[in-house]
Structures are given as structure tokens and as C-alpha cells.
Image: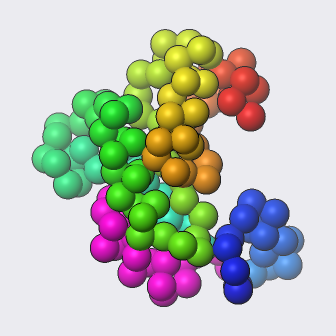
Amino acid sequence: MDGKVTLPALQRMKESGRKIAGVVAYDYQIAQLADRAGVDIVSVGDSVGVNVWGRRSQLEVTLDQMVLVCQAVRRGVTRALVSCDVPFGPLQEGTDAAVRAAIRLVKEGGTDLVKLDGASSFPEAVSAIT
């Protein structure tokens, strides 16, 4: 695919049966390599806490930390779509907190979309964010 990857472009890829490639990245260098390799989606997971920082659980990762990691990945990506996890907490705190977290990840983190784990249990927050 040429040009910036968008949600409509991904939808067209899916409809045409074209494979969509995605990778998890936690830093600028890996994000840059993935983007140059032609990956369609670069996902910034809250798993960074366990896999990079040695935390015992993803539940220990804060929104501030996710914004920081998302910023680093965003700087490394020019073509792929960047997805960033909303860490545990804001969604569970309620719709207003979830919306504020999503806005921070978009405005400050530079993500193209946010991922909400367990979203089916919080339909009001999903509706408010979308």
C-alpha cells in the first residue's frame, strides 16, 4: 500500500482479502523499522510494563507512561496506522475518565486510534469515545 494507512484503507484491504500486517512496538527504533518494512498497523501495548520495564502486571502501567511510549512510537512512524492501548483504570473509572484518557492519547501521544481492553463491559464509554 502506498501512502498513509487509514481506517478506510484497512477496511478496503480486508474486503479485498489482502493481508494486514501489524506489530507491537514500544520505542522509536522498532517503530521506525516496522514502518519502513511496510507494516500496516503499529500497536503500542500496555504490555510494555511487563516486557520492557519488568513490571509484574500490565495493570501497573499508567496513562502518563502510555502517552510517553506512544509519543516515541509516533515519532518513528510516518506511514502505518498507530494504535495505543488505554491502560487499566480510566475505562473502569467511568465514561468521563475514559474519554479524557482517549483524548490525551490522541492529542499528546499522537495515536491514530485507541484500544480499549474489556470495552464490551463499558458500552457507554465506547459510544462517548467514538
Q: Residue at x 30, y 39 (%)?
A: 65
Q: Is residue 22 magenta?
A: yes
Residue at far left of view:
54
Residue 46 figure quarter: top left
Residue 33 image position (x, y, % from top left): 39, 81
| Residue under the point 69% across and 80% down | 3
Q: Quadrant of the N terminus?
A: bottom right
Give the residue at x 34% y 51%. Answer: 69
Q: Residue 126: within the magenta? A: no
**Does 64 sit above or below residue 128?**
below
Quadrant hosting residue 13: bottom right
- Decide which of 67, 11 is in the foreground and name it: 67
- Report the quarter where the C terminus lies: top right
Instruction: Look at the image and tell me whether residue 15 can be seen.
Output: yes
Instruction: Give the vertical position of 64 relative to 74 (above or below).
Output: above
The total of numbered circles placed on residues is 0
85 versus 7 height, above or below: above
- In the rendered structure, the answer to whether residue 15 lies left or right of residue 73 reads right
From the viewer's perspective, tell me whether residue 90 is left or right of residue 103.
left
- The stretch in magenta equals 19-39
Q: Seen in the image, is 19 located left or right of residue 39?
A: right
Q: Residue at x 34, y 34 (%)?
A: 64
